[in-house]
Image (cartoon, helix red, strand yellow):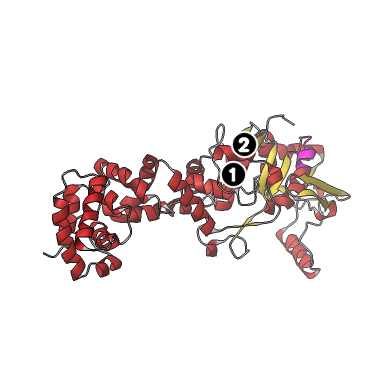
Amino acid sequence: MSSKVVTRFAPSPTGFLHIGGARTALFCWLYARHHGGEFQLRIEDTDKERSTDVAKAAILDGLSWLGLMPDGDVVYQSEQQAHHVDVAQQLLDKGHAYYCYCSKEELAEMREKARAEKRPMRYDGTWRDRDPSEAPEGVAPVVRFRAPQEGSTTINDLVQGSVTMENDQLDDMILLRADGTPTYMLSVVVDDHDMGVTHIVRGDDHLNNAFRQYHLFTSMGWEVPEYAHIPLIHGPDGAKLSKRHGALGVDAYRDMGYLPEALKNYLVRLGWGHGDDEIFSTEQAVEWFDLDGVVKSAARFDFTKLEHINGHYMREAEDSYLTEQVIPFLVAETGVDVSEDYAAMLNQAMPGLKERAKTLVELAKSAKFLVAKRPLELDEKALKLLNSDARTLLARVVTALGGVSEWSVDSLDEALRAFGEAEQLKFGKVAQPLRAALCGQTTSPGIFDVLYVLGREESLARLADQAVQ
């Protein structure tokens, strides 16, 4: 086998990029990067009825957003079909495959017999050793693989360990359908060989397939890749992750306001660990990741932990990066076209804004006061806070702030604290109505930062809108 590690991610384009698929892609990418190898992408689009261009685009978009694009061109399985058929013919020529002329009725009878005997359905080998000259007229045959019937097969899996299956549990799977099209099992093996894949990292729901694929590799005289079957992701209740647990697609996590680097950090910790390290960079993950750190048991998805990690990444992020990331969410939240002036204001306010937010959605909600049009729409808590006494107080605050010569954080701090002392009020009693009037809500960055970012004219106008003379 090649000394260079080659991994692949091979999704079917029948829907969004599943969060479990994203983690598989991440593990493949990290393993290849850790070993200085290649990460490849194959779109398994041979199911023409279910494969869609929209789904293909969604997979590529999701991988791009996560920074997991492949080395080299994307391989589309449907474009390799002629070669898959050729390999099936080679297996026929070698005696490792045969034509099967069983009718639908005969196969249905086999299924019924298996059901009655309470065992899995396996093809009974009716045409395994019969001469094709006995074939009934007008029946288009399928091509079946001649699986070994005695002994056992052992896979030395890099995650699951040594796993053995008795060969009498393997049936003669179909390689070519009656219409001449190749099946998934054949196509996967041929493509993995052609792409030079050395390590197949995928969900442990594919473990049984490995035994069947192993014999296809050996029947062609091809080297068998190393297998690593990773545990599936379960929901918080321990059941397999499904729609009832919430978001399944990577696009949904992006829409919920998670940063790609935070989601990657969270996903790599689902089923893999490096001591007690919870938060680490992609560069550290590449340095540390190996398959011996992957556990065998299923991992449970925890939104609270994901939010915690995302909040950490937001607090650590560059202000300009967060500004760029949050603008689409701010537009969606307010309907306001965020101009360059607003973006500059947002960037200026970011140090205070990002301290409280755990997602970009939360960040947009807390930042919407920056682009709000006067008079501000007050939320329920702000309305309750701005009673008649508070509004009267605001009128006096407007007068006090109007006399501030230099509109800076320090001078605003000094003026408001002096005002509070003169009014014999604790600072909170001054700041709370100010925040409600300036932001339309009761949470915001520090009040001096809010005043400074909004500027003298806008700040005094917003306060005057809510003040009672």
Residue drawn at point x = 50 percent, y = 47 percent: 262
Quadrant for residue 432, please give it.
Answer: bottom left
Residue count near mark 2 (Cα–Cα under 10 Å), binned few <14, some 14–19, many ≥20: some
Q: Earlier in the sequence, mark 2 or mark 1?
A: 1
Q: Please identify the quadrant where the N terminus is shown.
A: top right
Q: Main secondary structure of the magenta part?
A: helix
Let me know if residue 456 appears in the view: yes
Query: Which residue is drawn at the image coordinates 27% and 44% (left, top)?
Result: 345
In the image, 210 versus 456, the foreground residue is: 456
Quick one: quadrant of the C terminus? bottom left
- The answer to which of 189 and 434 lies nearer the viewer is 434
* Mark 2: amino acid: Glu
Location of residue 157 in the rendering, given as x and y in whole percent from the top left corner:
75, 46
SS label for mark 2: helix
Q: Mark 1 highlights which residue? A: 25
Q: Answer with the quarter of the image where residue 386 lies.
A: bottom left
Q: Which residues are magenta?
A: 215-222
Residue 392 in the image: above or below residue 164: below
Q: Is residue 82 left or right of residue 158?
A: left
Query: Marks 2 and 1, how far apart in space?
Result: 17 Å
Q: Which residue is mark 2?
A: 287
Label 1 Cα neighbours within 10 Å, binned few <14 / some 14-19 / many ≥20: many
